[in-house]
Amino acid sequence: MEQRLEWLQIDSLDLQARGVGRSENGKVVFVDYALPTERVQTRITRSKRNWESGEAVAWANTASSRVTPRCPHFGVCGGCSMQHVDPAAQLAFKQRILEDDFWHLSRLRPQTLLRPIAGPNWGYRARARLTVRLVPKKGGVLVGFHEKGSSYVADMRSCDILPKAVSDLLLPLRELIAGLSRPERAPQIELAMGDRVTALVLRHLEPLTDADRQRLRDFGRKHGVQWWLQPKGPDSVVPLDDDVEPLSYVLPEFGVVMPFRPTDFTQVNPQINRVMVARALRLLGARRTDRVIDWFCGLGNFTLPIATQARQVLGVEGSATLVARALDNALYNGLQDRVSFTARNLFEMNADDLRAYGEADLWLVDPPRDGALALCKALAEAVNGPLHADEKQAVENSQAMPEHATLPEPFRPPRRIVYVSCNPATLARDAGLLVHQAGYTLRAAGVMNMFPHTAHVESMAVFERD
Ligand SMILES: C[S@@+](CC[C@H](N)C(=O)[O-])C[C@H]1O[C@@H](n2cnc3c(N)ncnc32)[C@H](O)[C@@H]1O
């Protein structure tokens, strides 16, 4: 197909950090690496009925937010999509997405915008999943992230979003895997860093030989990392050797230490996590007399700090493994009298389930990308009685709700909810329910640059009932 060239004015960025303009034929065009305010000559490489996409081949001007990407693999590696944008502008862009989602999905504006939380722009990833592939054409084993939009592994020799000590391991890891008995049967290495210990989890599809184990051991000693092995699913992960120092991180403001295993969910960016937990707790404002529920509590990242301030905290979480870890961590920190944990699928909740957990003064909600729809619906229902069919439809369409008749309250809802989100679209949808159905006000919201140089938006919102 002949590829058309066209000059376009770029007005905004899409969720993958592509510039968005409009072509002469009226279609929206997504342009890789183009930024708002730029006029770019675009080679259209894909044309659909309503939209087109392409790549910028020449610039008439460059945006003031444009910077030179630091990484030589940028553009090929799929790990980062925004290294060409100044970090402050990245945060502004994420803030804009959050505000737009609140408005377009639920007709909401936060009463206050929280100052964005920024941390180190480089070396921040304490967790990563590296793909390993034997590619004889490229000279042996590759270890790294996938190439952009492809299942190939990027031929990366360093990675500046990984801590330097880990980035420096990328080439030695290639050599290590190439020397194993079945290098083509070791498809993945997962990184998990605690404050003092770095763990690497090797996924291997064939049993390792004694010589393989010794190689791993020698590598671990030389580079100061501990190896874990994963022969099957996530539950099969075991340390290579028994005498490993446990991974842990500290939340110093609360005097809490969190031991974890390398495959447990922990936040990717430990510096931002510390600030995020502190801000969430300040916004939550727990009093000594409060009962708090921490929904999607994981290993207790928020639960245990809250327990240092409140009377009682209940943590609810889908993974039984994480619930067990959270209990261990409560004991480890001497907080067991103030917390309890329970495992449950929170994507299936109704008002009766909610009542069974008892009333709470405050909620912390930190769901995965899908959000907390069932939980928010259950709360709205507990507050109001069952939703009417038209309201249910409106919820599904994520639109503003009609004013609901006030019914006698059978359930005392939490006075404040702090919602931590890794997907602004589901946060905005759930916010619509909390405000239009459950009688909350969206007091404040803001973004955190948990994942600099990616288009990933992490945010926090505060809801209150008067
Ligand atoms: C964003 S993480 C937050 C964990 C924790 N609050 C933290 O800061 O480390 C989301 C948590 O939701 C849990 N989860 C995912 N799907 C779930 C479900 N359907 N029901 C309950 N929990 C779920 C995950 O296991 C994970 O621990």
Image: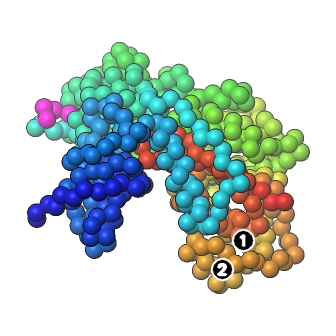
Q: Nearer the viewer, residue 353 or 51?
A: 51
Q: Where does the image place residue 302, in percent across and percent down from the top left?
A: 68, 41
* Visible residue check, residue 255: yes
Q: Where does the image place residue 388, in percent across and percent down from the top left?
A: 69, 83
Up-down relation of residue 22 to residue 115 (above or below): below
Residue for point 56% across, 54% down:
98
First in sequence, mark 2 or 1: give its number.
Answer: 2
Up-down relation of residue 82 to residue 221 (above or below): below
Residue for point 77% across, 70% down:
382
Residue farthest toward the front in the current orientation of the protein: 60
Q: Is residue 140 magenta?
A: yes
Q: Where does the image place residue 153, in percent across and percent down from the top left?
A: 25, 42
Up-down relation of residue 220 to residue 400 (above or below): above
Mark 1 residue's CB less than 8 Å from ligand 1: no
Residue for point 59% across, 63% down:
103
Q: Residues within 10 Å of mark 2 (few under 14, many from 20)?
A: some
- Which amino acid lies under the numbered mark 2 shown in the image of this protein? Glu
Q: Is residue 384 magenta?
A: no
Disc 2 to disc 1, how far (Cα)? 9 Å
The residue identified by callout 2 is: 391
Magenta highlight range: 138-142
Q: Residues within 10 Å of mark 1 (few under 14, many from 20)?
A: many
- Which amino acid lies under the numbered mark 1 shown in the image of this protein? Gln
How was this image coloured? rainbow
Marks 1 and 2: in contact by CB < 8 Å?
yes
- Label 2 sits on a secondary structure element that is helix
In the picture provided, is 310 more to the left or to the right than 281?
right
Mark identifier at residue 437: 1
In the picture provided, is 311 more to the left or to the right than 304?
right
- Label 1 sits on a secondary structure element that is loop
